[in-house]
Image (cartoon, helix red, strand yellow):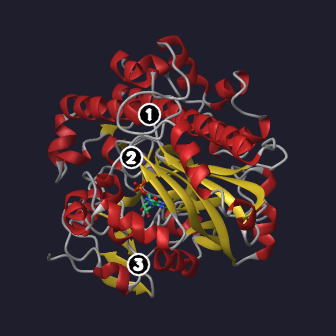
Amino acid sequence: DGITLERVEEYIWEIPQEGEMNTPARVLASEELLDQIADDKTLQQLKNSTQLPGVQQHAICMPDGHQGYGFPVGGVAGIDAEEGCISPGAVGFDINCGVRMMTTNLSYDDVQGHEEELVESLFANVPSGLGGGGVVESDVETVEEILDRGVEWALDEGHAVEDDLAHCEDEGRRPDADPAVVSQKAKDRGKNQIGSLGSGNHFLEVQRVTDVFREGVADSYGLSADQIVVLIHCGSRGLGHQVCTEYTREVEQAHPELLDQLPDKELAAAPAGSQLAEEYYGAMCAAINYAWVNRQLIMDRTRQVFERVFDRSWEEMEMNLLYDVAHNIAKKEDHEIDGEERELYVHRKGATRAFPAGHEEVPRAYRDVGQPVIIPGSMGAGSYVLRGGESSMETTFGSTAHGAGRTMSRTQAKDEFWGEDVQDELRGQKVYVKAQSGATVAEEAPGVYKDVDEVVRVSDELGIGDTVARTFPVCNIKG
Ligand code: 5GP
Ligand code: MN
Ligand code: MN
């Protein structure tokens, strides 16, 4: 309502700078995708975010963007790390929510006929649902070690191999983590949820590769047609949520002058250099480490389930981690702004890092082809593997989409869909779903999501993330 968009390029739209805006804002979308955010708050939230002090170039909405808490899901903002600010609302409540994909040498043929057994066994062995119960029960000291050391802890405990670390963003450890600024309450919430999916939108999906678009890159990633892969989507559970909740409140209270400048309280931010900015960053990085361990333990458990179902060792089945990447995160990164290197807090909320070939943060094994990007679709649609595109650094601070993006709220979804019907329909497509409740299935029905093919097409056309392969679900477990 009342927000004008100017077309810059085929898939780039701009909200021109005016009034209190520090920069223009940009939406990356086709007309079809734009239509789907015409009536919600996405554009207003994106526009609002340009009032954050120190925001550089433009605040950007990815093709899957939709409205969120204060800042859109699918939003990217690069904010000066010396003179700007950091905003917990522009990271999201589920700190380091993200995805990892594991490849196998199994083909769809090997799995057909075992789907029922596989989905039951995964559901029985991978903890999920709202409450507690993870792969490991622990105490506060263990949580602190996980917050500090990330997947290195899992390696020492026998839940990971070296190769898993090499194929994780930041090698599974954010060195800026500071467990001392994570509250006791957050740590307590984290104690018995290490290695658990959580509820709702989080899932573990066995998939088959249906299409390969870039053979050479797919080769480097170890992907081929008909292959079975596993996709794991979850985050930092109650611990990350607690960190976000507490720091949002603290930031509001400690920096009212900055809050008054902002059009939406949900964008509350701590000025760069303030004690609270440092503390939030340290706590957020600790929660990032927790989430990586969480996904690692779930993957470890998945390997064990496959060993039992297929009566072979996971090494024999070559169940290797392709990549793990966050999609709710803020990171200090150096980016070129007007020909100068600047340190930014790059906020990616429902957006995936997508560094191109040659970038030093891309794992050695993939450096020549670019960073793997994993974009889930829905339990009834394709999911994609992309590679960071050549234009991502100048267009999106090295980012692309993170999913298909929702088109309706959970409440609305429960009115539209009935869990059992959705499940039956999926079974007709040979997709085996097992969830904690019918409500979860309804809330996450394929119909609540946008067209992932269109999202990914736009990413590819823009050169920010190029399609490598497409998958389709075989088995899915949901919290
Ligand atoms: P979010 O992190 O925003 O909750 O979700 C990321 C994306 O995951 C969503 O935008 C949606 O496209 C995708 N997604 C949600 N549920 C499923 C599922 O069960 N299977 C797959 N493959 N993707 C899903
Ligand atoms: Mn999440
Ligand atoms: Mn997520």
Q: Which of marks 3 and 2 is nearer the N terminus?
A: 3
* Pointers 1 and 3 in contact (C-beta within 8 Å): no
Residue 300 percent coordinates (x, y): 66, 37
Q: Residue at x 76, y 65 (%)?
A: 369
* Pointers 1 and 2 in contact (C-beta within 8 Å): yes
Label 3 residue SS = loop
Asked where in the image residue 447 lies, by quadrant, the reply is: bottom left
Cα gap from disc 3 to disc 2, whole angstroms? 21 Å
Q: Earlier in the sequence, mark 1 or mark 3?
A: 3
- In the image: residue 260, left or right of residue 145: left
Q: Decide: is 460 above or below 308.
A: below
Q: Which of marks 1 and 2 is nearer the N terminus?
A: 2
Q: Report which residue position mark 2 lands on.
A: 91
Q: Decide: is 61 above or below 348.
A: below
Q: Residue at x 77, y 34 (%)?
A: 161
Q: Which of 43 and 337 is in front in this view?
A: 43
* Ligand 1 has an atom within 8 Å of the beta carbon of the residue at disc 3: no
- Residue type at mark 2 is Val
- Residue type at mark 3 is Ala
Q: Report which residue position mark 3 lands on.
A: 29
Cα gap from disc 1 to disc 3, whole angstroms? 30 Å
Q: Report which residue position mark 1 lands on.
A: 284
Cα gap from disc 1 to disc 2, whole angstroms? 9 Å
Q: Residues within 10 Å of mark 1 (few under 14, many from 20)?
A: many
Label 1 residue SS = helix
